[in-house]
Amino acid sequence: MDIGTAKLPVAERRGVPHHLIDVLELTEEASVARYQAEARATIEAIIDRGAVPLLVGGSGLYLAAVLTDFRFPGTDPARRAHWEAELATRGPAALHAELERRDPVAAAAIGPYNGRRIVRALEVGELTGEPFSAGLAARERPWRPYRQFGLELERAALVARLDERVRGMWRAGLLDEVRGLLPLGLERGVTASRAIGYAQAIAQLRDELDEAEAIAQTQALTRRYARRQVSWFRRDASIEVLDAAADGLAAQVEHRVADDLAASMGG
């Protein structure tokens, strides 16, 4: 899953080690708890080598799980099965409304389309007696000292880049990529088959959408996801917002990180 995930090609990584890429099989389900454990182990190894780990990405929950004292309650198969059955019969919108009634903060963070995470939030609420959103308070308790930067772009420019990114995926051969992944189990992968772009490419190959419709739907879902990302990160006061279009952006970040390292070593 290279094109649809916008995976940085090896040739563009400039010799810098990139971690936790290509670590899941196509049919495996992505898990924030698993990511937390693997990312933290990777971070520890990087620090032990005397290097500075950089976490780059847009999934707020995954970043929070690594950076803060984010803990995961267990699971109850009966409760999980109940809510998964409800999801299958009532759909994600109805379950999101139920979550909004019980835990509006979690409902706003998750959004109305991610049925798997809505089910988990409802399960956790019943299992622990506490709202799933209680975990969001973990951002007040860092796992390790860290510094966060948010790159902000004027909305019209951002939307144009998002839309072009989707068109570029189709030009780069997303349909051929998906065609090759289908025999390997793409549709059996809970996470993979639902990924934005892949679901639409599958629908196009099944003649359920034409190309223009598949691209337009992917663009709309990408913009919606980006809005949710912005909402999530705006709630985090620890983020230092930088102008993504500014000259010398990399130098700004490097300078701030260097100052942090000097301070941590007493220099």
Image (cartoon, rainbow, N blue to C red):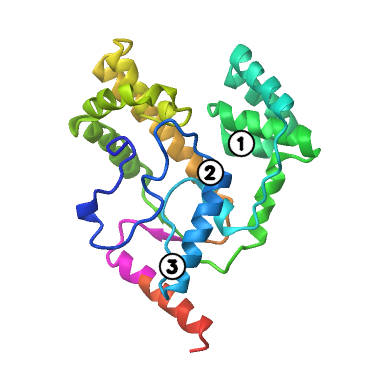
Is residue 252 rendered magenta in the image? yes
For residue 72, side relative to residue 207 (left or right): right
Quadrant of residue 4 within the rendered picture: top left
Q: Residue under circle 1? A: 108
Decide which of tag 3 and tag 1 comes sooner along the chain.
3
Q: Residue under circle 3? A: 46
Mark 3 belongs to which amino acid?
Ile
**Mark 1 → mark 2, Cα distance in angstroms:** 9 Å
Rendered view: 144 above or below 212: below
Image quadrant containing the N terminus? top left
Please report the bounds of the magenta region as a residue range. Answer: 240-253
Q: Residues within 10 Å of mark 1 (few under 14, many from 20)?
A: some
Decide which of tag 3 and tag 2 comes sooner along the chain.
3
Position of residue 262 measured from the top left corner of the image (x, y, whole percent): 46, 83
Front residue of this view, candidates 101 and 1? 1
Please report the residue visible at 25 percent of the width from the left and 18 percent of the height from the top: 211
Question: Can residue 64 be spotted in the picture?
Answer: no
Mark 2 belongs to which amino acid?
Ser
Is residue 205 rendered magenta in the image? no
**Mark 3 → mark 2, Cα distance in angstroms:** 31 Å
Front residue of this view, candidates 116 and 43? 43
Rendered view: 4 above or below 53: above
Q: Residue under circle 2? A: 231
Please report the residue visible at 57 percent of the width from the left and 69 percent of the height from the top: 145
